[in-house]
Amino acid sequence: MANAHTARRLPYTLDLYTMPEKNTDLLLDLGEVALDAALDGGIIRDIPILRTLYAIVTTAKSFPERIFAAKIRRFLTRVSTATEQERLSLIKQLEDADRRKNLAEVIILALERIDRLDKAELLAMVFLALVRHQISDEEFLQLNSAILQSDLDVLRRFVDALHSAEDHNPKMLKIGFESLIVAGLTRGSGIISPDSSGTFTRVTDLGLKLYKILYESPARA
């Protein structure tokens, strides 16, 4: 049985913009079964935002549209792991038309902008955290922005560094996470490494929040 660390490790991904078109077609075909099952289960059919995304997937024809569809599939497949209680909670949360519209805009624009397929799954995990009342609407926006601005490989190392630290909250992070400052996940410490190759950083509250979502939220892969 895999340990907790292995089970939560962010998966390696494919670069959508260098992938041959025939491989993208295969990727899209493999996603159909999972999405069809989710539709039958009601999670997509019953949620307006998800139903809109599913419609985009089913009408994709051009290569750029199919790349976008691949991102949406990853997002929807993860979201479809929501429990029945979470599905009902989401329906209630989206009764407000303005909130429903705002969330739809945020999700669609974020999925358009991501440059790695795995980021769609991370966005879905953040969305599920919102559904579970683990984060506020403001934190949802901040975390979406952080994922978009972060290099995925650096983000993986960041999450692993927190998981390896005592209490998962290190007082100081080694060099290599300065790029996450702009994403709001780390902050400068003002301490330069002995060889002057970089600056040590500290984890922000937002960084801790993202770690908890990725490692401590219920795993339903």
Image: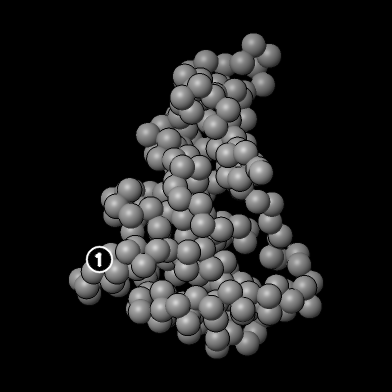
Q: What's the coloring here?
A: one colour
Q: Residue at 61% of width from left, 79% of height from top?
A: 32
Front residue of 103 and 51: 51
**Residue 140 horizontal side relative to residue 34, left or right:** left
**Residue 11 horizontal side relative to residue 158, left or right:** right
Residue 68 in view in this figure: no
Furthest-left residue in this view: 96
Front residue of 195 and 40: 40
- Residue 14 place in picture, x, y as percent: 71, 60
- Residue 173 place in picture, x, y as percent: 54, 24
Q: Secondary structure at mark 1?
A: helix
Quadrant holding the N terminus: top right
Q: Tag 1: Cα neighbours inside 10 Å, few (<14), some, or many (≥20)?
A: some
- Is 137 rendered above or below residue 30? above
Front residue of 7 and 74: 7
Which residue bears the numbered disc 1?
93
